[in-house]
Amino acid sequence: RTTWGPWANTYFAIYFTLTGLHALHVIAGALVIAYYWGPGSKMWKTNPEQFTNRIEVSGLFWHFVDLVWIFLFPILYLL
């Protein structure tokens, strides 16, 4: 067994948990954006206002993940 990992101490448990949750949010955001780029773009022809709203909300989500990472990066990697 190695000396670092989620089982080693509380710091590594929190580190791996937060990094894993961040990765899940990035993957979810990428999937949502991919959906809007492909099949979801058909909504532009039928209901452009709702499509625009969905794009704005997904952009807000993406930037929220970026903002969280701006704080997580120094806390996890620099402290």
Image: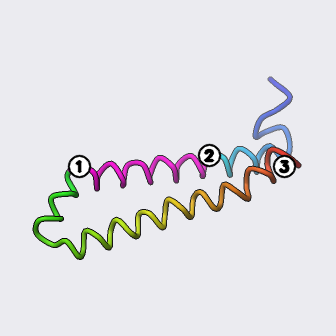
Q: Relative to 52, is 7 above or below?
A: above
Q: Secondary structure at mark 3?
A: helix
Cβ–Cβ under 8 Å for marks 3 and 2: no
Judge from the rendering whether residue 41 lies leftward or rightward of residue 34; answer left or right: left
Q: Nearer the viewer, residue 51 or 31?
A: 51
Q: Which residue is mark 1?
A: 38
Check disc 3 and report the residue beneath it. 10
For marks 3 and 1 on the same chain, the one whose residue lies earlier in the sequence? 3
Looking at marks 2 and 1 on the same chain, the residue that comes earlier in the sequence is marked by 2
- Element assignment for label 2: helix
Whether residue 76 sits left or right of residue 28 in the image: it is right
Mark 3 and mark 2: Cα distance apart in space: 15 Å
Residue assigned mark 2: 20
Q: Is residue 64 left or right of residue 30?
A: right
SS type, badge 1? loop
Q: How is the image coloured?
A: rainbow
The N terminus: image quadrant? top right
- Total number of numbered labels? 3
Q: Position of residue 48 (x, y in %)?
A: 19, 71
